Image: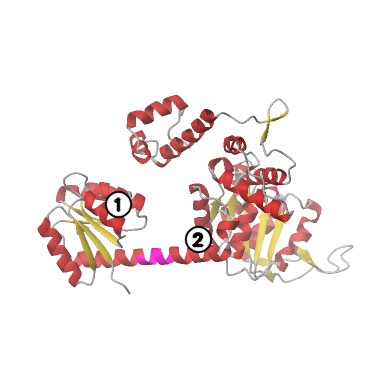
Amino acid sequence: MSETRILFVDDEAEVRRSAAEWLTLSGFSVTTAANVAEAKAQLARQDADVVVTDIRMPGEDGLALLRHVTEHHAGVPVILLTGHGDVTMAVSAMRDGAYDFLEKPYDADHLVVVLRNAGEKNRLSRELARLRGRLAHASGLDRRMIGQSAAIQGAREQLLQLAGLDIDVLLRGETGTGKEVAAHLLHDLSPRAAKPFVAINCAAVPESIFESELFGHARGAFTGADREREGKLVYANGGTVFLDEIESMPLALQTRLLRVIQEREVEVLGRNAPLPLDVRFIAATKSDLKALGDKGGFRPDLYYRLAASELDLPPLRERGNDVIALFEHFAAEEAARNGLQPRKAPEALLTALLAHDWPGNVRELKSLAIRFALGLSDGMPRQAACGEQALAAPGLAETMARIESEIIRRALKEAGGNQAEAARRLQIPRRTLGEKIARLGILDTSQP
């Protein structure tokens, strides 16, 4: 195993020298820096596995370095060296992402133990990220869940985490956000991939045959049952059952489904003994199941059973430039399928795509891109207003204001509504941010 690389930052030369000697003898690879500026330069040249920094230094302090590492070198543990009066500050810094803190004068042997643990944590995190990257690449995850926005990258990361866990998942998202795509990915990236994936649209199955469809029946179980029917749950044994629009499932069947999920066995009508069931359930909804349960429209116990693991899929309007990437992908794909030359989208169309609210999300965008690729429309999105009228492409100023407003709202949300912190993240003066908030009419700065 390669040596753990330590960046040790302190403004006192003797402290740096003695620490470097001791840590090198302890098996670490050590570089030092006298201040935050030097530390940033060192990190720019070569990443470190662990950063150790004094808090109080001339100029920028150790907390500034912590923020820099958190933002630009994600996953690298930062250990703070504190004076007696800095303990409260250091504890607060741990909530902001610091790995640990040691009070001066620190015990050198204890520092070695902390550094070894931090280095191992970083190594494991990097290995996990590498394996996930290989898995994502091998599965074509980036091609099946397209986009580079923070929202979709977060969803992809969470999906990769859930895929390898044998737990049930509740997918939440508006119509057209790609819940079935996510369900297929959860199955395809799981150990159950070689077994059946069975999709059931709970809104499309008539209530009169729902029970038979899911649970099946034995021959002679009722009048007209002249042969045995294998239910979809039994057919899916070993694999995955995807229950789309689960909010539409009749309440009586919700009770039976809850029992199946809890007991992992299914009672087939006409059979005396239940059949063991080894399936993973993935449910999808566009509704707030908890609120629906409070009104008596959905069983709360079923909701809590399904909601042990949840994955939220972001609406298209929150995905920024992903709209353009998705439109171009769908259009090119459809053109190739029909042997057509891809059409280049004009700037006015791209502007209109970014400005549209996309109530139908990716499904609406895909339909629009297909019609554009086939030359059946100009690609301009439409919205209902005084009848079905074409949405005129907004001017550049309006579009830029919309994009700027979205960026500011996101920064404010990430900063918890703190305008000073949001201004720092946006790298603009606090006063400038205040003027933009007033001009753009961003009233509630704690919300997205």
- Place residue 73 in its image quadrant: bottom left
- Residue 200: image x %, image y %? 71, 57
Q: Residue at x 38, y 40 (%)?
A: 415
Dot 1 or dot 2: first in sequence order is 1
* Of the pair 381 and 50, the residue shown nearer to us: 381
Q: Is residue 127 magenta?
A: yes
Q: Residue at x 20, y 59 (%)?
A: 32
Q: Secondary structure at mark 2?
A: helix
* Of the pair 102 and 274, the residue shown nearer to us: 102
Q: Is residue 29 magenta?
A: no
- Residue 375: image x %, image y %? 73, 43
Residue 165 appears in the picture as rendered:
no
- Residue 62: image x %, image y %? 23, 49
Q: Which residues are magenta?
A: 123-128
Q: Say few, some or many: other residues with alpha carbon within 10 Å of mark 1 (under 14 / 14 to 19 / 20 or more).
A: some
* Of the pair 272 and 341, the residue shown nearer to us: 341
Q: Disc 1 and disc 2: Cα gap in Å?
A: 25 Å
- Place residue 367 in its image quadrant: top right
Residue that badge 2 annotates: 161
Residue 293's place in the image compared with 402, above or below, is below
Q: Residue furthest front?
A: 341
- Residue 442: image x %, image y %? 46, 29
Q: Is residue 120 left or right of residue 279?
A: left
Residue 152 appears in the picture as rendered:
yes
Residue 53's place in the image compared with 314, above or below, is below
Q: Amino acid at mark 1?
A: Met
- Place residue 275 in its image quadrant: bottom right
Q: Secondary structure at mark 1?
A: helix
Which secondary structure is most common in the magenta stretch? helix
Q: Amino acid at mark 2?
A: Gln
Residue that badge 1 annotates: 94
